[in-house]
Image: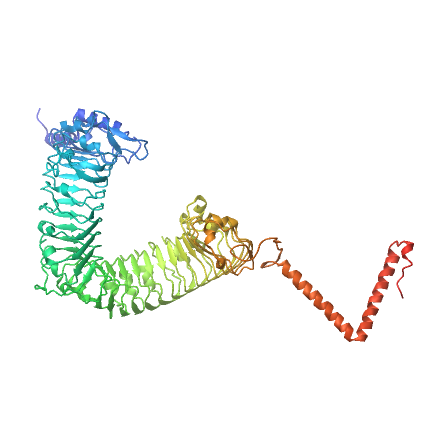
Amino acid sequence: MGFNRFSLPAVAVIMMINAMLLSQGCLEEERIALLQIKTSFGDDPNDISSPLFSWGKNALCCSWEGVTCSNSTTRRVVEIHLFFARDWYSSMGDWYLNASIFLPFQELKVLDLGGNGIAGCVANEGFERLSRLNKLEALYLLNNNFNNSILSSMKGLSSLKYLNLDFNRLQGSIDTKEFDSLRNLKELLLAENEIQDFITLTGSEGPSRLNKLETLDLSSNYLYDSTLSFFKGLSSLKYLYLDHNWLHGSIDTKGLCELNRLQKLDISYNNITGSLPSCFSNLTNLQALDISFNHFTGNISLSLIGSLTSIRDLKLSDNHFQIPISLGPFFNLSNLKNLNGDRNELYESTELVHNLIPRFQLQGLSLACTGSSWTFPKFLYYQHDLQFVDLSHIKMTGEFPRWLLQNNTKLEELYLVNNSLSGSFHLANHSLVSWLSHLDISRNRIHNEIPTEIGAYFPRLVFLNLSRNDFSGSIPSSISNMSLLEVLDLSNNGLSGNIPEQLVEGCLSLGVLVLSNNYLKGQFFWKKFNLTYLTELILKGNQLTGILPNSLSNGSRLETLDVSLNNLSGKIPRWMFSLLYLNLSENNLFGSLPSNFCSSGMMTRSLIGALDGCSWLNKLDLSHNSLTGEIPFELGYLNNIHVLNLSHNSLTGPIPPAFSNLKKIESLDISYNNLNGKIPYQLVDLNSLFTFSVAYNNLSGKIPEMVAQFVTFSESSYEGNPLLCGPPLTNNCSGEILPSPLSRYGFIDMQAFYVTFSVAYIINLLTISAVLYINPHWRRAWFYFIRESINNCYYFLVDNLHVPARFRRFQPCV
């Protein structure tokens, strides 16, 4: 029976499905071995984040996560990736691997066991057993707990090309003989260990067997030997990383400068001193050199650096080099793309530069150094590929270099911080829309107005800092066109007028807004507040009026708010206690402090979690306002607060004893209020307290004992409280009689009462005696009054009381 017209397509589909299924399968013995690996790694079947979760869910083992099979019909496993396959952070003790479980994978090329906390291998089942896997090329053992013994177990793995032992426990001296059998190794990564040096017990000068090694990473170890002689013999080395070690003193270049194939050398973050070795000029294949964060000295001269004609990336920052501002010695480096010379010494070169036009076209230039006043170096006029420029702190003079933007249309970041630029902030050709994302020209002398079209010219800005200049006029509303803007700092200028409403409506990405120390005015009340990403708002030192708007809290991520030194009024909204930093000082705020802010709307970051130790507020300054009422005890549960200032208000009542819970507080100022009662003795437990003042209140009683931090507080911390006693005040607390609360300010001083009463009594008695002595008529009337009073008292007693007869003969004279 022949095939119908649908038979051939159906057969083709079936064959394709079978081919797909076969391509996802693997040999049965390897599938069983994979399941054994899963068991040995202690996989949690309920942990869907585990890379072993998919293993065993179906029979198509080549589709399991981390398993790669060959494309041939053999369907053998060629790669096994078990990176962080074992939850070793929650397990106890070291874990030892049985390396024999990988022997069934005869075609295995890549084995990744990183991040599993392996301390070693079980006895007689170490990595030397893997020598039977003669196709194994890459072994990744990073992020484990292997010690030096792991190197001995590598013997026989002659097929290895890539070995990664980063983040383990290798330490001390390493015998280079351990690597003799790894003769095909191309990449050896030993970063983030505690290796101190390499030695050769056999007497040879280096690991000569590693003559195929191209990459060696020894960064973040404890290497201290600056001779670097152990590199001799590594003739194929191209990439060498020695950064973040303890290399010190002058470099003995024996071995290092013989690496004439070297393309990248990183010896940054060490303590190397002296001048740059002259033999570095022999490294003509070097493309990237990083010697930053050392103590190199000397002039960067043409003879020293001019022969590195292959160099592309050169990092010289944080040394003691003398670099000419003209960059003359670098002019012949035609391949140079990125130069970083930050925090060195710039100087004006007296040498004539024969070729005034450099052969390089830089992409990145960073020369943030302290220096004298210079004009822009001429070589910058010939650069057209710049993407990053930082010429901060060198006191560059002249006007803002709009030609730099005009010539470099790909410029993305420009930093001209802390220079001496003056004049107006002119923009380049308006038809040219800049790609600039970061612009910082703060701390200069630029004046006049900010260009009104700045938003149209820089629509891609993410970071804009024009602070600490002499700008005047209003804030351009065109800034709202910068829809990608995240940081805007216009502080410390002479800007005036209102804050444009468009600013808070258009810059939707804005996270930091700093407009402090200007002359901005108007109502601080934004009905339309769309800055949902705003985390920091600093408007201090202006002339803003109105109340604190609740609209700031609508969907906002606000963490820092500083509106101090303004003319704001009204009460403090409860939601503000959910911030990290709050400064409302020197305004006209009134009313009492919120005592129930735990019920405010933004309690994901508020004091409702404070009772559980989860409050975030670390600085609160409400000083110099007109706040009244008592201090809420809830403030005592701001367990992360470092600074609390409630001074210069009209607060009453006692100091909450709950303040003793402020274990992280460093500054507590509640001076110049009307507080009464005693200073809680529990405050002596505040061991982080460095500044403390309760001056000029109505506090009474004994000052807390001078122990711990309270030993450091002088009399000025307590002055202006007449009823306080004890050190450091001179008032003695011995025989203290506690006063009674008879006035709104606290207690009456009884000693003062007795003195004033006695003086008043004596004065009255003397006054009456003097009057009676001078006036006879008043004296006779006084004596008559006394006699009548005595008679009336006598007859009152006789008529109303039973007086014995023997007393009746003593009758008063009539």
Q: Can residue 335 be seen in this view?
A: yes
The answer to which quarter of the image holds residue 195 is: top left
The spot of residue 273 in percent (x, y) is 20, 51
Q: In this view, does 51 lie to the left or right of 602?
A: left
Q: Is residue 359 above or below residue 768?
A: above
Q: Looking at the image, which residue is at 18% across and 53% down? A: 274
Along the viewing direction, whichever of 660 and 524 lies nearer the viewer: 660
- Locate the N terminus and report the quarter of the image it occupies: top left
Along the viewing direction, whichever of 510 and 386 lies nearer the viewer: 386
Q: Looking at the image, which residue is at 18% across and 39% down? A: 198
- Locate the C terminus and report the quarter of the image it occupies: bottom right
Along the viewing direction, whichever of 385 and 272 lies nearer the viewer: 272
Q: Is residue 375 above or below residue 113?
A: below
Along the viewing direction, whichever of 700 and 116 lies nearer the viewer: 700
Q: How many marks?
A: 0
The spot of residue 85 in percent (x, y) is 25, 34
The spot of residue 393 in percent (x, y) is 24, 62
The spot of residue 313 in percent (x, y) is 15, 52
Q: Is residue 350 above or below residue 666?
A: below
Q: Looking at the image, which residue is at 31% across and 57% down? A: 510
Q: Can residue 399 be seen in this view?
A: no
The answer to which quarter of the image holds residue 562 is: bottom left
Outermost residue toward the front in this view:
203
Q: In this view, does 240 lie to the left or right of 502?
A: left
Q: How is the image coloured?
A: rainbow
